[in-house]
Amino acid sequence: MIVTAAVLLLSSCTKDKLYLSNPNNCRYDTYTVQFQTIWGGINSCYAFWDIDGTNWDAVYSKYLPIFEGLDKQETVTDEQLLAVYDGMLGTLVDHHFNLSVVNIATKKIIDISPGIKQVARRDGYHENLQAVYGDVNPASCILKLSEDGRLSNYKNSYLNRNFAHSGIITKTEGGKDTRILLLRLDSFDIMERLDAETPEGEPKPMEAIENYLTLLADNSLKGIIIDIRSNGGGTVDDLQYVFGPMLKERYEFAQIRHKIGIGRYDYSAWSPYSVAPLSESRSGCYYDRSGIPLVVMIDMHSVSCSEVSAMLARSLPNGVILGERTFGGQGILDFDFESGFSGTFGSQSGNHYCYMASCAVSDLNGKCYEGVGITPDKEVAFNIRDWANRRDTQMEAAIDLIAGK
Amino acid sequence: MKHNIILSMFVAAGLLLSSGEAVAQWRLSAIAGADINSHLVNSQFAYDYHYVPEWGYTFGVEVEYAFSDWFSLKAGLDAISKNFKMTRSGFYKNIYEAQKNTYLQLPVMASFSFGGQRLRGFLNVGPYAGVQLSRFKKGITPGVVAGYSGVMQYSDYNIRNDFSAKADNRFDAGIVAGVGIGFQVSELIGLALEVRDSQSLVSTKKTSRVVSTLDLNNTCAFLVSISFSL
C-alpha cells in the first residue's frame, strides 16, 4: 500500500504532462488552452485511434509551439487560424468530424472538416447531386422519367424540401418493359416526419414512404432500386422502413464498438448492429423479395446512414451496390457525451464544438471503412454532361442491371 | 574513491552474513494461492468509470539460497492473475467489462527471517519482471437495433482479448513485498503462509508522451507454500 501510494504520488506529479479536463466544460481565453482542450478531447473521445494512422502525440509536439506563438501575436486572422487547424486535423479518418471553433481575436467561428477536403481530392470528384446544377437534381431527373412515360405510381414527400420519391419504373431507356420499384431518399428523415404536419398544398411527409410500402406488395416486381446518392444520413431507425419490410426477423448486418475508458485505445468488444423487421411495428408488413435484385445506389456524398445501408445491402444475398465509393463516415453519433465519454464535445454556443462519431462501425468481418468509404460492387461514374440534360447515367445503369438492356 | 566504496560494501556484506550461523543451502518451494488485483487508473474527467478489484490465482515455483539463518535470496517463476472489472453507475449500470489477465512473473527477493527454529516470520522484498501471457474479457456493451435506437439494447461478450502492438504493453515490471510465517515440519520440509503485494511500475498500455495517464496493477496474493531443502 505504501508503494502504491508512492506510485500514485509520483504519477500525479509528472512534470510537463497534460492533465485532461472535461472538454465540455472548459473556459479559456488563449489559443494555447483552446488547442490543449481540443487536442485532449479528441485524444480521449475519438472512436478510431486503432484505425487512424495519425500520430496524435506528434501533432501535439508540433502544434503546441504554433498555438503558443499565436498567443504572442497582436491579432490572428480567421484564415491563419483555419490554416493551422486544417494542418492539425487534416489526416483524421473520422469523416463525420467537424470542428467549429471561435477565433479568440475576431470572435468569428471557423469550421474545419477534414473529411470534406479528403473527398474533394478524389479522382472524378463532383458536387453533391443537389448542388451540381441549380435546377437539375435527383427529383427533376425522376420527373424526367415520368415525362418520358417510364414511371408510374409516382409519389413524393415534402417537408420544407423534397426528401423522398417512390414509383414504378416501367421501361428501360431502350424501351424494354420492366417493373422496378424505385425509392429515392435525399435524407434519412422518415422517423422525424412520421407525425409531422402537412404543409398546405404539399404532399404528405410520409406519402412516398407509404407508396413504397404499398408497391412493395406487388409480386410482379422485377427488382428494387434504393437511390441514396448524396444522402447525408439521418436516423438509423429509418432502416426499419427501407429494408425492414423485406426482413422476416431481426437481421444482424454489421458491428459497432463503443469507448469504455478515457485511454486512447479503451474500446469495447464489437457488438451487433441489427435492423428490426417493420412487421414488429406494423403487423403483417413483410414481403419476401429475396428472389429479385435489390440495387442500392451510392455516390461519394452518400454518408453515415447511407453507407450503413450499403453495408446492409451488401450483406443480403440479392443486394448489389452501384455507383461510386461512398464518403467514408459510417460511425454512429450519440449526443449523450456521458454515455461513453466519447464522440461530440463542446457547445455550439461556446468557444468550440467538436462534432464526431461516438462509435465505430465495421462489417461482420470486422473491416471498418471509416475514412475510406464503401466501394460499390458495380462502379458507375457520375456523368455531368448527361446530368445537365436530366439524364441520370447511374440510374440507367441500375435499371439495366435489373432489366437487361 | 569509487573502488574503496565498493570494497567497503563487500566487506560490510561479508561481516553481516557471517555474523549468523553458516547455513548456506538451497531450498525449492511450490507456492499457490488466491490474489486480488486492483487496476489503478487515472480516469480524469470520466467520473463514471469505476475500476473494481477482482480475484484470481497465483502459483509457481521458487528457489531460495540461504546465506545465513536470517538472510536469503529467493527467485521465482510465477503465474499470476491480474484481473479487474470496469463498471458504470446510474443509467449505464448494466454496462461493464471484466478482464482476466494472466502474467508470468519473475520476482527476485531478499528474504529476511526472524524467530525460533520451527516457527519463523519472514519479510520478502525485491523487484520483479514479467510478461502478460493471455487475457480474456467479458462484459456488456450497448448494441444497436435500427427501429429501436432510442431504447438501450445490450449485447454481452466473452472473448479472448487479442494483444495489439499499437495499444498494449505486455512487458511488466515492478516491486514485490511480502510478509509471512514459516513452520519447519521436518529437517527437509517447511510450510509457510504469506501475504505478498506486487506493485507494477509499467503501464499496461502504450502511454502517451503528452497525457498524464496511469494504468497500473496492484496485486495482493495470499499464498501457501511448501519448501524442500536440497
Image: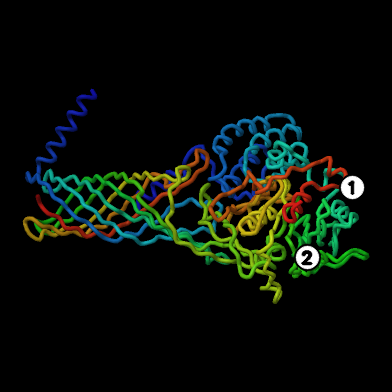
List x then y, in percent, for residue B191: 15, 59
The type of colouring in the image is rainbow
**In the rendered image, is residue A351 in sight?**
no
Query: What amino acid is at disc 1?
Result: Asp
Callout 2 crowding tier (Cα within 10 Å): few <14, some 14–19, many ≥20: many
Question: In the rendered structure, the residue with mark 2 lies on which chain?
Answer: A
Q: Pointers 1 and 2 in contact (CB under 8 A)? A: no
Question: Which mark, by number, is residue A259?
Answer: none
Q: Quadrant of residue A276?
A: bottom right
Circle 2 is placed at which residue position?
A212
Circle 1 is placed at which residue position?
A135
List x then y, in percent, for residue A70: 68, 31
List x then y, in percent, for residue A295: 70, 55
Question: Farthest residue toward the right?
Answer: A201
Question: In the rendered structure, the residue with mark 1 lies on which chain?
Answer: A
Pick whichever of labels 1 and 2 is earlier in the sequence: 1
Q: Nearer the viewer, mark 1 or mark 2?
A: 2
